[in-house]
Image: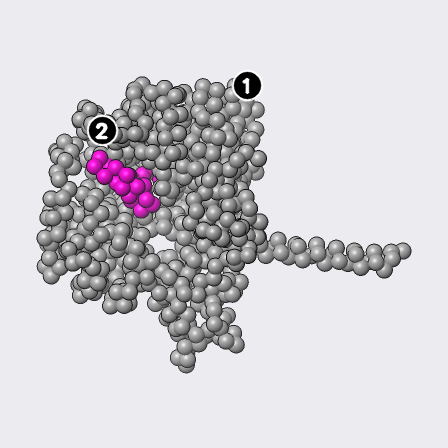
Amino acid sequence: MLTHVAAITIRAAILIQRWYRQYVGRMEMRRRYTWNIFQSIEYAGQQDQIKLYNFLGYLMDNFTPSSNERKLISHIFRENEICRDAEWERYFSYTNIDVPEIYSGPRLTFPLDANQAADLVEAFRNKQQLHSRYVLQLLLETWKLLRVLPNINRISTCHSKEITICGDLHGQLEDLLLIFYKNGMPSLEKPYVFNGDFVDRGKDSVEILLILFAFLLVYPGEVHLNRGNHEDHIINLRYGFTKEVLSKYKMHGKRILKLLQKIFSWLPLATVIDQKVLIVHGGISDSTDLALVARMDRHRYVSALRPPKQKSSVAIQPSVDSEMEDESMNSKHSILRRRRASLTYFRPLPSRKTFQCRSLQDFSATVARTMEEELKIQHRQTSLAKPGSSMSYRHFNMSKSSETSTESINSPDNINNEWKEILDLLWSDPMTEDGCIPNEVRGGGCYWGPNVTEDFLNKHNLQLIIRSHECKQDGYEFCHNRKVLTIFSASNYYEVGSNRGALVRLGPDLVPYFIQYQTNSKTRAMSFGQSIRRTEHSALKVLREQLFAHKSDLLSAFQEYDQKNTGLISLNDWSSAVGQVLHLDLPWRMLRSQLLTNTTNDMLDYHNWFRNLTIKEPSCEYIEQTLMETLYRHRSTLETIFRIVDTDNSGLISFEDFCQTWKLLSVYLKMEISCEAINDLVVSIDMNKDGCIDIDEFMESFRLVDKNIRKPEEQDLPQEEKQTTEEKGTLLTPQ
């Protein structure tokens, strides 16, 4: 019989165990909805970019060449114009670029050797920059090598060496340096496969590319690069790589970007190890055929978002030399010419007579989805979570934007089939249920289920698919009965402590061996709860931005519940209204304590709640509220259009082009934006009255500030983090 003390001890242990389980459960719930917030916003941005590109492509196919709108955007579609190799080599000639004696960075001589590649890594570790002459030479040599590689690399393991596979790096040089520190640099004994998405988001995409290309040239049989969905110049416009190149290489940045477009199109699409393991960036679909992938001309698909347009037999292809002449012009003259544009006399949209078939307003409905269509998509996505659902990819129509881009070109069926193969390989994601359906969350590729994986592996006599494309908390994750492995190598992707990076090694037995890491030293001093709280803090900030961006829709929804116009709604009604407007599968009732302040008797003053969300720029108070909300909600899309319109890459656009940009955006969004509202916006942001708009300053002017934002408790953070939250991460030392 237990003594009284022993009974109390057991009860205490049970209570502690119960408390701990509840605590872990709450932390896991918070981790899941935090992850859901980040991924929902990330995928929505990718979908917006695809919609925008399809819209602009539709303009190109339906406007006359003389129309103003077509002239603004035509240069981003020139990538499909195939020029002779001799022209390209002359365009990217580096011999006329002098390297000054004061240059202290690495100097390259070709052919490269392993020592030079290692020196390049060390130089980038020390924040040095490679001179543009060597950049162009390195890229040109890489392009020549990639052109002789097959679409699918086939490699083998042996007992003396394992093959290392790395996933997304996204411009995070610290992760690549840590991989080399833990696993060794590429060599004859240390082969690597880098599975795409080398660029965008991070600040060192250029350096990562140059390191990978250097090792590819030194060890062409041991270093293998697969193309990712971010190796695409259209995606780069939105996610930072274009801006990074132009800021680091102001004089020759345009040349570098043009050559990178060609290089990206020549990157292999997949790698097969020992004829048993397929490595591809995104995934597969129920129509994926490796035989078709192996024989297609991959370089024709410079952007995976749109199939190449079939050229007329009488069309005259412009020479690359004309672009070289344009680039050689003094950029100051271009800026001065733009500054002569008048605010009062900006160029209006052309009349209907300048359109071939229909007006911009007429066919905008073909591109943008209605709210009813969006709700139908939400219902289809929800049905995926129901067990037992089995759907086929071919039973679904392609999305409206895909139909638009496909119907707007007159290309052979095999071109479209090849394009869809590439789109699936680069953009697809696995799902838990059987079937294969369009990936309407990202806007490209498909979702494929375990039955599709099983059929594909049996058809091609494979045993494992290794893919990347999705951030995972532990850096890797198995699914589909451990026959699909996701590997993601960019640690702290959403926020410091949000996830680990990982790499995987495969030996002759093809059994995966994982190495995990995090590049920020602060994560080592953080407990599990502190890491969750920090990541949650960043996710809630993103969510608040979404709430502000949908202010008008939310006000209408709140007023439906507030029939007496008291300005108050219950917290339950707030949860219901927010869920209806944002269409995010989030536990809004749980989030109320994080998002709402100053509630009284379970009632919320929603007008006061919105007043606590303000825009940074004081002059914004003179701008029409509808225009302000539109700007904030679609600021990434607007910035992308600005980058497209800024053809001389000066970072400045004239009032004339600014107004034309807004005209394009208003039709794309199917909303009326008056000329007066645009003029007021221009006047409010042209602080120095120079007749030009600085793109970066304009976008920074509309950053959200939440007066009541809750920061993680200081006592919950490591001491070094209290000193500064802006300190850059350092490499981890070996454990």
In the rendered structure, which segment of residues is drawn in magenta?
230-253
Q: In the rendered structure, which amino acid carries the disc numbered 2?
A: Pro
Instruction: Tell me whether circle 1 and circle 2 mark residues in contact (CB < 8 Å).
Output: no
Residue found 36% across the figure and 50% down from its top: 45
Read off the residue under disc 2: 100
Question: In the picture provided, is 183 more to the left or to the right than 634?
Answer: right
Say which element carries label 1: loop
Placement of 508 over or under 602, stated as above or below: above
- In percent of width and height, residue 321 lies at 14, 31
Tell me, yes or no, whether the highlighted magenta stretch contains residue 138. no
Number of labels in the image equals 2
Residue found 36% across the figure and 36% down from its top: 127
Q: What kind of secondary structure does the magenta stretch mostly adopt?
A: helix
Residue found 30% across the figure and 25% down from its top: 107
Say which element carries label 2: loop
Q: How far is the residue under mark 1 from the one under mark 2?
A: 48 Å
Residue found 49% across the figure and 63% down from its top: 594
Q: Quadrant of residue 21?
A: bottom right
Q: Quadrant of the C terminus?
A: top right
Read off the residue under disc 1: 159
- Of labels 1 and 2, earlier in sequence is 2
